[in-house]
Amino acid sequence: MRRLSIGVNWQGAFDLNEVIEQAKVADDAGVELLSIAEAWGRDALTLLAVLARETSRIKLGTSIVNIFSRTPAALAQHFATLDELSGGRMLIGLGSSGPNVIEHFHGMPFDRPLQRTREYIEIINMIMAEQPLNYNGKIFKLERGFTLRFKPVRPHIPIHIASITPKSLQQTARLADGWIPIFLPKPQWKPQLDAFYSMVDAAGRQRSEVDVRNPSAVVVSENREAVKAAEAGNAAFYIARMGDFYYEHFSRMGYADEANAVRRAWADGGSAAGAAALPRDLVEDLSTVGSVDECVDALEEAREAGFTLHGVSVHERDPKKRYEIYRRLVG
């Protein structure tokens, strides 16, 4: 069986009944994870509470919640409660986000994200393990020995970390249960995965202890050009408008010229020009769009490369047909 993950919409038009129906179909079909992103749209945790009630087997998680707008103890409370509501099916996806969002949406300084990530992981793990919360970090100093006023369902909820810089990747390899990459064109799969798994080895861990999500979209759709256009627009937005992290990420992978072209085009002509400046071959390497069989081949290719959890999207709206497609993708 292939381990699949799906997402639900966090912005724009929204129909809760449709989201619940999508989750139930994926649950019945054997999809492993439903993961909800959170940026400056709907919050993820409210939706997870609803879906915990409406599903029975599928794991539920975030991809991602940021580590600035809530304290580590607040996140531990949220996820411990959600884990109880779901019968132990939660997965925590964390990331630093970036200064644009943290400083200009949440109004907080984007300070020491790497250290902050480490302390969040350690504090959440302590709380879930029911250890008295005495913690002397560089950011958080907690001295009263608090423990939760209820017993967590599990002593540990898996934590996946979104990381792209070399130091954050090393920390993820040491401390996290999973890595959430972003924007890895197919020619970069082997060098990026080799580098990350080498870090896992250097941390003295087994590679099987750490999940690695496949960031390359696998989309079952007949409308190939529309999906590819959306992929180009999303990548260009991150390069041009989401600070320097993603721009530098593309540059480190050898796409500095392409990233600079996107930034120049966006500055001169806006979002459409920025997306158009992204080379077609690079857009092609960021995702697979096509028939079920084509998408199954892409999933197998990604599994052989070393990814363990694979994001998929199915554009078929009929629930029965969508169920059958998921079943074929799961295998």
Image: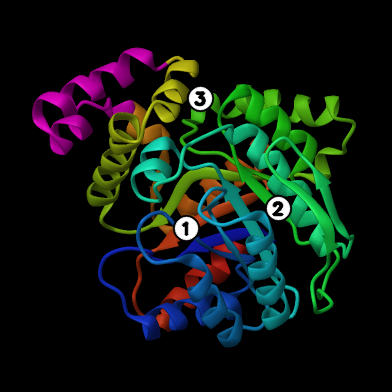
In the foreground, 143 or 5: 143
Magenta stretch: residue 100 in it?
Answer: no
Residue depicted at x 70% and y 37%: 172
In the displayed structure, would residue 168 be above or below residue 46? above
Identified at 36% across, 30% down, the residue is 243
Does residue 106 sit above or below 205 in this rendering?
below
Which mark sits nearer the N-terminus, 2 or 1? Answer: 1
Q: Main secondary structure of the magenta part?
A: helix
- In-image side of 55 versus 228 (left or right): right
The image quadrant where one finds the N terminus is bottom right
The residue segment tinted magenta is 255-281
Could you tell me residue 305's position as x and y percent?
A: 65, 35
Looking at the figure, which quarter contains the C terminus? bottom right
Query: Residue 38: which quarter of the image?
Result: bottom left
Q: Element type at marker 1?
A: loop
Where's residue 3, x and y in %?
65, 58
Residue 191 versus residue 73: which sits nearer the camera? 73
Which mark identifies residue 37?
A: 1
Give the residue type at disc 1: Ala
Check residue 263 for magenta coloring: yes
Q: Residues within 10 Å of mark 1 (few under 14, many from 20)?
A: many
